[in-house]
Amino acid sequence: MAIREIVKYGDPRLVAKNGIVEVYDDPGLAALLQDMKETCWAAPGVGLAAPQIGVSLRVAIVDLSVGKDPSQLIVLVNPVVVDTQGRIRDEEGCLSLPDLVETVDRPERVTVEAFDEHGDKRALDGRDLLARAFCHEVDHLDQRLFVDRLSPLKKGLLLRQVVKRQRKGTW
Ligand code: NI
């Protein structure tokens, strides 16, 4: 088990197509999830998607407690957003775009259907920050980052900072 390197914006692995998980109760899937938890908690972050550690699979985790409360860890295998309600604007960031935050519109409530590591399908309801985290992680699996939800102007300003840091070698 290991803390893995988090892939940053600009890396092609973040925008690679992510395959569907077809085998559950699998040692490879269990090991992936363990690495994702350790990497997410160490970062620290409230969620992580497999492509962020360079694994092109539809797997993500969300843990608003960042490892403090095991009951808050949510495993999302092959998740699909099936319902959304309302709209809320709030600041959002991403471990693949370190130290950059911007206001992003997200649903206030969502229902996500996802499997756990054993292949049990569940419907998960989230509101506010949990809804935001679900949407953010499912977006990753669809090769979409929060900057892709911004206006072209705001996205451009934010990505200018990325380019600056890339040039300085601090990205
Ligand atoms: Ni992210």
Image (cartoon, rainbow, N blue to C red):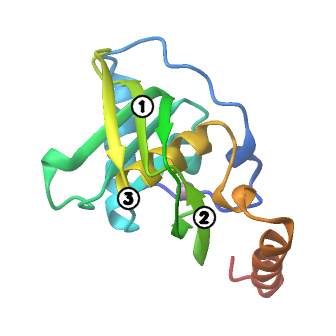
Q: Is residue 10 left or right of residue 129?
A: right
Image location (x, y in percent) of residue 70: 14, 49
- For marks 2 and 1, the one nearer the N-term is 2
Local crowd at mark 1 within 10 Å, few (<14), some, or many (≥20)? many
Whole-angstrom CA distance, mark 3 to mark 2, is 12 Å
- Which residue carries the number 2 mark? 104
From this view, report whether residue 135 is shown above or below residue 165: above
Split into quadrants, the picture shows ligand 1 in the one at bottom right
Which amino acid type is marked by label 2? Val
Q: Residue furthest top?
A: 22
SS at mark 1? strand
SS at mark 3? helix
* The C terminus: image quadrant: bottom right
Q: Is residue 93 left or right of residue 12?
A: left
Which amino acid type is marked by label 3? Leu
From this view, report whether residue 103 is shown above or below residue 33: below
Q: Is residue 23 left or right of residue 95?
A: left
Image location (x, y in percent) of residue 47: 41, 53
* The N terminus: image quadrant: top left
Whole-angstrom CA distance, mark 2 to mark 1, is 19 Å
Which amino acid type is marked by label 1? Val
- For marks 3 and 2, the one nearer the N-term is 2
- Which residue carries the number 1 mark? 112
